[in-house]
Amino acid sequence: MAADLSQIVKAYDVRGVVPDQWDASLAELFGAAFVRVTGATAIVVGHDMRPSSPELSGAFARGAAAQGADVTEIGLCSTDQLYFASGQLDLPGAMFTASHNPAQYNGIKMCRAGAAPVGQDTGLTEIRELVEGWLDGGAPEPAATTGGITRRDTLDDYAAHLKSLVDLGSIRPLKVVVDAGNGMGGHTVPTVFAGLPLDVVPMYFELDGTFPNHEANPLDPKNIVDLQARVLAEGADLGLAFDGDADRCFVVDERGEGVSPSAITALVAARELARHGGSGTVIHNLITSWSVPEVVREHGGTPVRTRVGHSFIKEEMARTGAIFGGEHSAHYYFKDFWNADTGMLAALHVLAALGGQDGPLSGLVAAYDRYVGSGEINSTVADQTARTAAVKAAFADLPDATVDELDGLTVSTADWWFNLRPSNTEPLLRLNVEARDADTLARVRDEVLALVRA
């Protein structure tokens, strides 16, 4: 096919519409290029429940084997299950998924041995250039000896590893509603939760990459409405929602209210610090709540602030030896999980914390949710730079304001902060505001938006 790789090779992964933008023949070339760039003699490959995933991952495996690499296919898996396999087997890996994108999309998330990410600056550019060269001038030269392709089931080992990191043996029984969104949570949750004192109410556990019930993107409030209603109807202790490839997990309390990922980050950080002897570094991106660094310091840890994006978090995790990292988008990263993100491990921490005391989840997380946040507000603008400059000019000279430009524009005072940053892919400015009270939040939010949308 005549493919435009600039449309499908993103900053951190490959993603596009199948078969319009890419297909099995292109997946085979990506498999060959992946082996060439990593120098791997063996790799591991897994895939989600999308209709196109088995064909694409099989083609990738053939391309890799033709270059001499032995391929371990783990079949249906969540993205964090693929990271587990890459870490446990110490092999480079490829996961076929388009996460929460609509059904016609598919993609590849690639990593080096030990689940180290492959992005634009860490091999993805070279992979793209190799594939483009082959598209222009013929197929890659095969290796003298073709690698073998074998199957291996890693689900039980994945579940056992996660449960070895969180003690759930002595928690009180909990009733938990789980919305898998027809994604890979329907595959992993039954095995991970087996044997725990949990009464699990499953929602949309049938693996279906056409997403018949709702988009598998719990970050959008409309996609957790069913879960919120079911938690209330069941009188459950909490609800959990996973995205399509089940690497992110969102939490709903017993009142049906969504729990901020910042509060989950703070809660898990406190638990991980306790597990590591009351010290350690915790990474958080610059739009997580003030609560996160506060709680980290209160529990003996050192908070480190980064730009938004998993590659920045993982780089800082590796550089600082951090024990944990969290993002506003409900990605949670663990030193004991090869610095990779796993929503399932964060969910186990929440269950252990809730089940280890007698109060409701809303009361437990209140200690970690101290401020009022706007959530992310997007504005379509013609000139991101000019609008950002206008906002900076208006706020930079306030008497107690500090300004930094680590990622977009952040302005902070004693009572509020906001971050305004451009989208990398669309003509949008993204605004996040946090304040000590709702009135202050509304005032700052409205002043910034008036300038952005002027």
Image (cartoon, grey):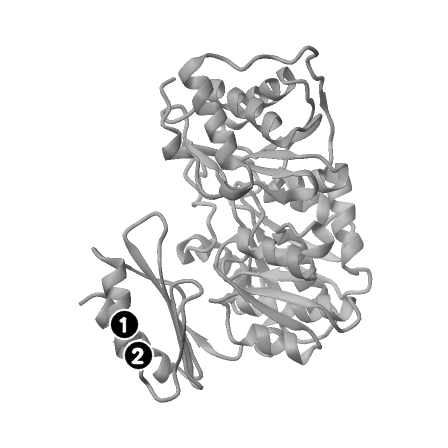
Q: Which residue is mark 2?
A: 395
**Residue 72 seen from this side:** yes
Toward which corner of the image does residue 156 lie, by quadrant? top right
**Residue 268 seen from this side:** no
Quadrant of the image containing the C terminus = bottom left
Dot 1 falls on a residue whose secondary structure is helix
Q: Residue at x 32, y 79 (%)?
A: 396
Q: Which residue is mark 1?
A: 391
The x and y percentages for residue 100 are 46, 44
Q: Residue at x 59, y 68 (%)?
A: 304
Whole-angstrom CA distance, mark 2 to mark 1, is 6 Å
Report crowding for label 2: few under 14, some 14 to 19, many 20 or more residues within 10 A (C-alpha): some
Toward which corner of the image does residue 155 lie, by quadrant? top right
403 vs 142: above or below = below
The extreme left residue here reads 454
137 vs 311: above or below = above
Left or right: 384 in relation to 63: left
Report crowding for label 1: few under 14, some 14 to 19, many 20 or more residues within 10 A (C-alpha): some
Amino acid on which disc 1 is placed? Val
The x and y percentages for residue 234 are 57, 60
Amino acid on which disc 2 is placed? Phe
Q: Nearer the viewer, residue 232 or 151?
A: 151
The x and y percentages for residue 257 are 49, 67
170 vs 248: above or below = below
The x and y percentages for residue 362 are 58, 73
Toward which corner of the image does residue 270 lie, by quadrant? bottom right
Q: Residue at x 41, y 38 (%)?
A: 102
Contact check, label 2 and label 1, Cβ < 8 Å:
yes
